[in-house]
Image: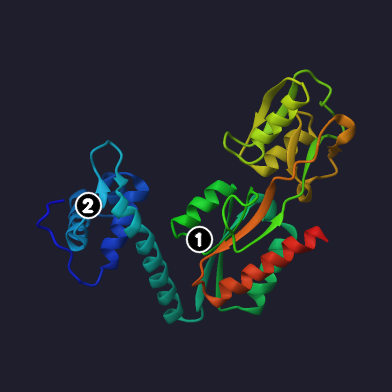
Amino acid sequence: MPDSIKPNRAIYDLDMLRTVVMVADCGSFTTAAARLHSTQSTVSQKVRRLEEMVGQQLLDRSNREVHPTDAGETLLGYARHLLAVSSQLTEAMSGGVTVTVRIGLPDDFVAGKTMQALAAFNRRNPTVKLEITGGLSRDLMSTYDRGELDLVLIKQRRHSREANACQPERIEWIDSAQYPCFAQDPIPLVTFPPRGLYRDDMIGAVEAMGRSWRIAFTSSSLAGIQEAVANGLGVSLLPSRVVTGGHRVLGAEQGFKPIKVFEAAIFHRPTADPMVMALAEILIGILRAEEE
């Protein structure tokens, strides 16, 4: 970006913000243009105009895939927030919906008491629109950091990141009740993908027992992990809330020590809407009830 370009105080155009967000998300001007039903030259022009407005380069075009610069990352966070607020305003003015709350939950919370509580909240507050996303904790946290979620409940190592509220996570070693495989050598393990929660701790614990291991099944789906263990594909480590009748809990008798290094953590921004705060209290109550 030339030094001669100086930022001005013009009001940011939402269409330009939407365009730069789409290019950053797609990593490509061509793909972004297709999704925006526009031309590549028009998309490029809008990004250029926005860069001239802020006086900084927002996207690094030097590689095949386009990436945001440091300044671009800063702008993207605000842009996502402004676009979300604009969407909420449109909904409110079109009748009924006063606020949209975007919630991220791990798969083991996307069921049962959590869904019942959120649905009951929605019935009590019909003007609140809930958008609930399920997924892996690391993905949810990345989405939250990009400003695309208002409230998240994730699992993390204790005290790894300061949260609005947290509760120790009770996890269990599980084997198949009908087709146990703990006695196999090497021990077959059923895990989430690399960098997924619990995976390294599983491997470390088995090695500390002097046992060899192999990865028998990998999935980012909680249901897939549950079914693989129940059907005898391997041993796994999961929250106690998702242990089923098809599982057998392993413990000290099999040489496993309790793993107490994880917590469920809730995050929302200090300036969050009161409805976000109210929903956070509901999630906190669910976590505390599990420990009673």
Q: Residue at x 32, y 59 (%)?
A: 75
Residue located beneath label 1 in the image: 149
Question: Three-letter amino acid code at disc 1?
Answer: Leu
The quarter of the picture where residue 182 lies is top right
Task: Label 1, secondary structure: give it.
Answer: loop
Percent x, y for residue 167?
Answer: 71, 57
User: Can the viewer see residue 76?
Assistant: yes
Percent x, y for residue 183?
Answer: 84, 22
Q: Residue at x 43, y 79 (%)?
A: 94
Q: Is residue 120 above or below residue 75?
A: below
Question: Three-letter amino acid code at disc 2?
Answer: Gln
Q: Residue at x 44, y 60 (%)?
A: 147
Give the number of callouts. Answer: 2
Q: In the image, which is nearer the foreground, mark 1 or mark 2? A: 2
Check whether the beta carbons of the residues at disc 1 and disc 2 lie within 8 A of each other: no
Residue farthest to the top?
Answer: 185
Task: Label 2, secondary structure: give it.
Answer: loop
- Is 219 on the left or on the right of 69, as rendered? right
Residue located beneath label 2 in the image: 57
The quarter of the picture where residue 261 lies is top right
Percent x, y for residue 225?
Answer: 70, 38
Q: CA distance from mark 1 to mark 2?
A: 26 Å
Precedes in sequence: disc 1 or disc 2: 2
Q: Nearer the viewer, residue 144 or 125?
A: 144
Q: Residue at x 66, y 73 (%)?
A: 121
- Is 175 on the left or on the right of 110, as rendered? right
Is the C terminus in the top left, top right, bottom left or bottom right quadrant? bottom right
Residue farthest to the right?
Answer: 253
